[in-house]
Amino acid sequence: MIARAELSVFWPGITPAIKYVRNNRNHCNRMAPSQPSAPPMNQILPDYPFHCICADYFQYNGFHYLLMVDRYSNWPVLERASGGSSGLVDSLRRSFVTYGIPDELSSDGGLEFIPGNTRQFLLNWGVHHRLSSVAFPHSNCQAEVGVKTVKHMITDNTGLHGELDTDLFQLAILQYRKCPDKDTKLSPAMCVFGRPIKDLIPILPGRYRPHETWRDTLANREAALRNRHMKAAERCSEHTGRLPPLTVGDHVRIQNQIGHTPRKWDKTGTVIEVRQHNQYVLWVDSSGRATLRNREFLRKYVPVHTRAPPHSILHHLYHHGPELQCKQDNHLTTSTSNNATLHRPHGAIVTNSPW
């Protein structure tokens, strides 16, 4: 826009003038391109199995399931859930009793994770709930990948009513827990138990003995994952840009992620809370509700305040004429009473006089 204008005209201050017109055009703000994705952020690295877990509550063929994935070992836990948030709490309680209480639980903020009983349960058990932003599943990517894998397992392996206690499904998830990673050469069972677990496929004798030390397993795992993490960080950092942080009270435009007009900046709001991991709580102007969004989908703007037109003398008299007339009548009444007091006959009795 600026380059095109410079081919035709020029005057001092042309660039700020063009930017001012561009920033105050609602159509230009709505059709603005998307912002670049933020570089990957370092998460809390788990130190032991089930230190940090990811969870996702999903639906398949009309039945609800809860999937939990251990971030250290990739050990999956799948349960049939029902009853909304109460069923979710029961499934989490059984998992915590079996595998231990984690320090952090990551979820996409589904309807079952938001109610007060779920939050109170996690608070009572000392679990930090890491919540993903709206339409930003990248922060819970490990659980999303786990859901995709588990959906392949439960296809044609569950009961008529979605039951998981079938031989086909249990053998399928047993094979997944025993399958080694392509880089670390360690299976989820090896990371959790320190040894392979027995299934229907035989292995050489002596392979079920536990590993000598857990430190060797941890060192081998870190050495094998070092190159993968470095390559993943370089790949995720391409075409990214660091956006300036927002503060409470900033006016922002919100980019649509769903609906009939995705990627358009239709809604506006105000920042009311700043959270970690580029998350902001907004007060949406159109709906009057609070929502959690990632910095990538927020664009700061300065609201345009229209100046009031100058008032003429006729406009001032029309709106303030009665008020001025009342003030003039009060002044005349006061003046008349004062004159009457000054010309009072000699010898008249004056009440409430200081003399």
Image (spheres, rainbow, N blue to C red):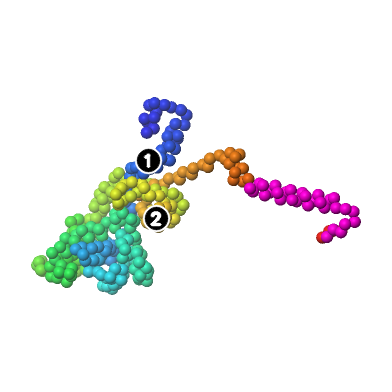
Q: Mainly helix, strand or loop, the magenta region?
A: helix
Q: Is residue 175 visible?
A: no
Q: Residue at x 37, y 71 (%)?
A: 124
Instruction: Determine the secondary structure under disc 1.
Output: helix
Q: Kindly give the residue lying farthest to the top in the view shown.
A: 8
Residue occupied by mark 2: 287
Q: Nearer the viewer, mark 2 or mark 1?
A: 2
Few, some or many C-alpha atoms within 10 Å of disc 1 (few <14, some 14-19, many ≥20)? few
> Disc number at residue 28?
1
- How far apart, in angstroms, are the residues tagged by discs 2 and 1? 23 Å
Residue 28's x, y, as percent? 37, 40
The answer to which of 116 and 319 lies nearer the viewer is: 319
| Badge 1 amino acid | Cys
Magenta residues, start to end = 322-351
The answer to which of 318 and 45 lies nearer the viewer is: 318
Residue 84 lies in the magenta stretch = no
Few, some or many C-alpha atoms within 10 Å of disc 2 (few <14, some 14-19, many ≥20)? few
Quadrant in which residue 119 is drawn: bottom left
Quadrant of the image containing the C terminus = bottom right
Quadrant in which residue 61 is drawn: bottom left
